[in-house]
Image (cartoon, helix red, strand yellow):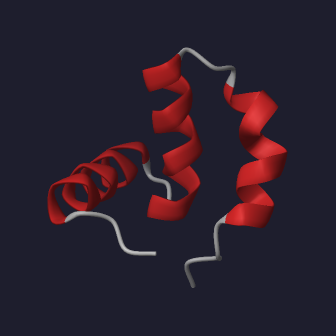
Amino acid sequence: MRLPASLDYLVRKEAERSGMKPNQIIPEILARHFGWHSESIGAVSKSSFPKDD
């Protein structure tokens, strides 16, 4: 699944800033946005998002 261009840009910039890969930062962004604890979605995110090699 591809992200809209503006969202893709934001994810890539945030990942670059934090030193993480884009697929690794998405759960953190969602957690901040929705007020979730990132640990609670960590297990799901690891299996849901393909690795970015």
Residue at x 37% of width, y 74% of height: 2
Of 28 and 48, nearer the camera is 48
- The image position of residue 20, as x and y in percent, is 50, 55
Of 10 and 44, nearer the camera is 44
- The image position of residue 14, as x and y in percent, is 32, 45
Residue at x 20% of width, y 58% of height: 9
Residue most extreme to the bottom = 53
- The image position of residue 8, as x and y in percent, is 27, 61
50 horizontally vs 47: left or right: left
20 horizontally vs 39: left or right: left
Of 12 and 3, nearer the camera is 3
- The image position of residue 42, as x and y in percent, is 76, 43
The total number of labels drawn is 0
**Location of residue 41 by image quarter:** top right
Is 53 placed above or below 17 here?
below
Q: Quadrant of the C terminus?
A: bottom right
Residue most extreme to the left = 6
9 horizontally vs 23: left or right: left
Is 1 placed above or below 31 here?
below
